[in-house]
Image (cartoon, rainbow, N blue to C red):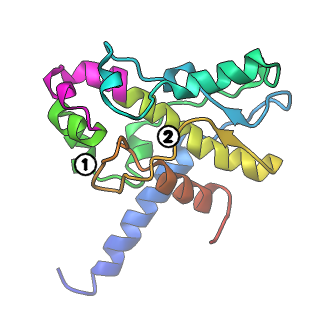
Amino acid sequence: MSSSSSPSVTTDAETLKRNRILSSKLYFDIPIFKLPLIYSPDYDISFLGIEKLHPFDSSKWGRICQFLSSEGFLDKNCIVEPLEASKEDLLVVHSESYLKSLQSSPNVSIIIEVPPVALFPNCLVQRKVLYPFRKQVGGTILAAKLAKERGWAINVGGGFHHCSADEGGGFCAYADISLCIHYAFVQLNISR
């Protein structure tokens, strides 16, 4: 490829990324009575007890909200439930080949550091492990919008800081923080 065509390729990739962000459904309006507190019961990972093989508590998100509710600090009706990040949403940061690699249970087992997951059909791994992660990605992205609108927001899940565009690890399959930043640059007109 000649150097003269390189800027065009970059521009096309940036345009595609921008269009993916603008067509995403992850940013949506929240009624004023709802707190900018984002959580879904789907965040919790429960997978035949296998989740207990990792030191990370994969059900802590629900327990946090349950505690706040039982102590009278939180009305569950005021919590915002995010949407699941779609493949198109994830392609803003992740490569097609990385997302395809998550269709392999052995690959996911390495990322989440739970070797027995390699033995399960990937349809189960998608539903019981990766779907909760994708919901949390949606929550992280939505939290940025709410923080800008209301001055603060909390996504009870997310924060998958061990994941990059082409590699997951440390119980982090998706780069929600990078995705959140890309969405904020385009949707919220944040420049730095």
Furthest residue toward front: 55
Q: In the displayed structure, does residue 66 sit left or right of residue 174? A: right
The answer to whether one can see residue 76 in this image is no
Say above or below: 90 vs 25.
below
Residue placed at 45% from the left, 44% from the top?
89
Give the prevailing secondary structure in the magenta stretch.
helix
Residue 80 in percent (x, y) is at 69, 28
Q: Mark 2 points at which residue?
A: 137
Q: Give the range drawn in magenta.
A: 113-129
Residue placed at 41% from the left, 35% from the top?
56
Residue 179 in percent (x, y) is at 49, 52
Which mark is on residue 186?
A: none
Spatial distance from mark 2 to mark 1, Cα to Cα? 16 Å
Residue 59 in percent (x, y) is at 49, 24
Residue placed at 58% from the left, 45% from the top?
141
Q: Name the residue under label 1.
A: 98
In the rendered view of the protein, which quadrant contains the N terminus?
Answer: bottom left
Q: In which quarter of the image is residue 174?
A: top left
Q: Do the CB atoms of the residues marked 2 and 1 lie less than 8 Å apart? A: no
The answer to whether one can see residue 168 in this image is yes
Q: Callout 1 environment at 10 Å: few (<14), some (14 to 19), or many (20+)?
A: some
